Amino acid sequence: DGLRGSQLRQPLFEYSGACSGCGETPYVKLMTQLFGDRMLIANATGCSSIYGGNLPSTPYTVNGAGRGPAWSNSLFEDNAEFGLGMRLAADQLMGYAQQLVKALASGIGGDLADALVGADQREEAGIVEQRRRVALLRDKLAASSQPRAKELAGVAEWLIRRSVWIIGGDGWAYDIGY
């Protein structure tokens, strides 16, 4: 599917409140159509933090499965590091979940454990298949009496690779006060 047909997918960015003619918001909408149900957004201070986190409302939403972008704002120039921290944390949680899968492989089933750890998640079809495997894993963990099963259930969602996006703003561009 990829970029072709992307405009037929549900956007998880519904409205922005940005200035009329803003050129950034169509890209944010497209990102949510392609990656929104597994997206982590590191947002720098600027226009995008105003239209992206204008509480008590938000332009970001969830799909029918209850999945949508997770958004957080960083102040000024540290957004690259902030986003890198999100990537590193997501990778660490995935690695920890994979360690638990390996440790509990006998109770999970060797084939499922191998598939969960070795999943190719570069394409959307791989993500969909991994979600199916994680749902199966959750069912097995719910019926398990192994002490670490509950621990794995708490991090099983991190077996699905996240897509981290660093969105800049005028504050990140060093132009506030300069």
Image (cartoon, grey):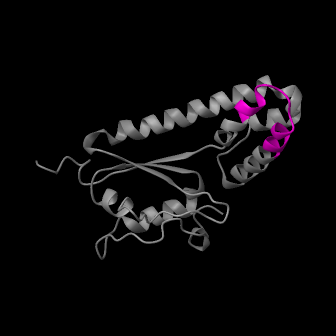
Q: Which residue is drawn at 59% across and 56% down?
A: 37
| Vertical arrangement, residue 100 with respect to residue 39, above or below | above
Residue 85 place in picture, x, y as percent? 44, 34
Residue 57 place in picture, x, y as percent? 41, 65
Q: Which residue is drawn at 78% across and 50% down?
A: 132
Q: Does the magenta stretch include residue 77?
A: no
| Vertical arrangement, residue 46 with respect to residue 114, above or below | below
| Vertical arrangement, residue 117 with respect to residue 178, above or below | above
Residue 64 place in picture, x, y as percent? 66, 66
Left or right of 129 on screen, residue 79: left
Q: Does the magenta stretch include residue 137?
A: yes
Instruction: Say which of 100 and 29 sits in front.
Output: 100
- Which residues fall within the magenta stretch? 136-152
Residue 69 place in picture, x, y as percent? 52, 55
Q: Quadrant of the N terminus?
A: bottom right
Q: Which residue is drawn at 67% across and 45% down?
A: 121
Q: Residue at x 52, y 33 (%)?
A: 89
Left or right of 47 on screen, residue 68: right
| Residue farthest toward the bottom in the current orientation of the protein | 20
| Vertical arrangement, residue 164 with respect to residue 32, above or below | above
| Residue farthest toward the top in the current orientation of the protein | 103
Prevailing secondary structure class for the magenta stretch in the rendered image? helix
